[in-house]
Image (cartoon, rainbow, N blue to C red):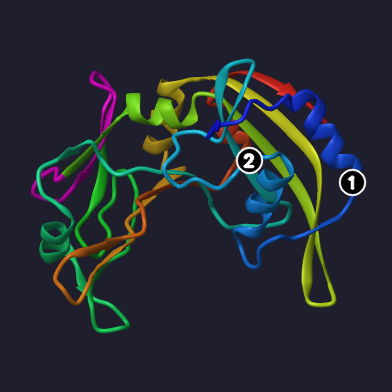
Amino acid sequence: MKIFPEVDIMKQVPKIKKMGYVQTMREHDTGIGFTYESLMGIKENNLKNHDFTYGGEEVECKTRRRGTSANLTMFTKEPPIRDIKDVELMKKYGYTDQKGRLGLKPDCVYGQFNPQNLSLSIDETNETISLIDSNGYKPWTWTCDDVSKKMRNLLLVFADSKKENGSEYFFYDEAYYLKDFDRSKFLGLVKNKKIVVNLRMHQKDNGTSRNHGTAFRIGSMDELMDCYEIKIQII
């Protein structure tokens, strides 16, 4: 069984648009993406680096409600280069959360330190992004190789939404196929504070870490699209 299906997006995306408003298959924020991927024939798999293939190429799928001001999670990725692990990171920079646990869930941006004394730094020569504190210590580092694997090709879909009888409905009526991810433009967005890295972890009762995935987020879809050399509007 193929984990990553081959999807002819030039046929399937217009087909979904013709369905009009579709009732969500899952409540709350993740319903828009889960419903669309289900209509595309993509099964949920949290271990994947991409969602499907098109013409044999790996593609990530992202959906966006119109009118939302919330940042879009482009991907979640733990750093391949770590000087310290989750629990040590929390002990060094964390705080007691609302449930009385040791936690670390701040937004981190380039060039300014948050209350947890963490910021982002960029090494443009080596194409890396690091967590950094005010002493210059870099506990975690991501490489652009890792980012490129997640964002190489992207299907970006926009939808209108409405509520009826307590349920949400989506009309997926605009979609773009984005190819050839540009690392330098991505790093430029980090440098211009357009991309936020959100840590999402707390310590469990047994002393180990519960990490919900470190999220790279962006607010502007136009700026996200500018990270790609080729932009094809499907619908």
Picture coordinates of residue 233, whole percent (x, y) = 76, 25
Question: Is residue 231 toward the left or the right of residue 12 in the image?
Answer: left
Picture coordinates of residue 145, whole percent (x, y) = 33, 24
Name the amino acid, label 1.
Met
Name the amino acid, label 2.
Ile
Q: Nearer the viewer, residue 198 or 8?
A: 8
How busy is the neighbourhood of tag 2: few (under 14 within 10 Å), some, or many (20 plus)? some
Q: Is residue 200 above or below residue 207?
A: above
Q: Is residue 74 above or below residue 149?
A: below
The residue most toward the front is 1
Q: CA distance from mark 1 to mark 2?
A: 18 Å
Q: Which residue is mark 1?
A: 19
Q: Is residue 161 above or below residue 12?
A: below
Q: Nearer the viewer, residue 5 or 49?
A: 5
Q: What secondary structure do most residues of the magenta stretch adopt?
A: loop
Q: Nearer the viewer, residue 184 or 4?
A: 4
Q: Quadrant of the N terminus?
A: top right
Which image quarter: residue 11?
A: top right
Q: Is residue 103 above or below residue 54?
A: below
Picture coordinates of residue 119, whole percent (x, y) = 25, 49
Residue at position x 83%, y 31% in the image: 235
Q: Nearer the viewer, residue 56 or 101?
A: 56
Closest to the camera, between mark 1 and mark 2, is 2
Residue at position x 86%, y 35% in the image: 15
**Range covered by the magenta-colored residues:** 122-139
Q: Which residue is mark 2?
A: 42
Q: Which mark is residue 71?
A: none
Which image quarter: residue 60?
A: top right
Picture coordinates of residue 21, whole percent (x, y) = 87, 54
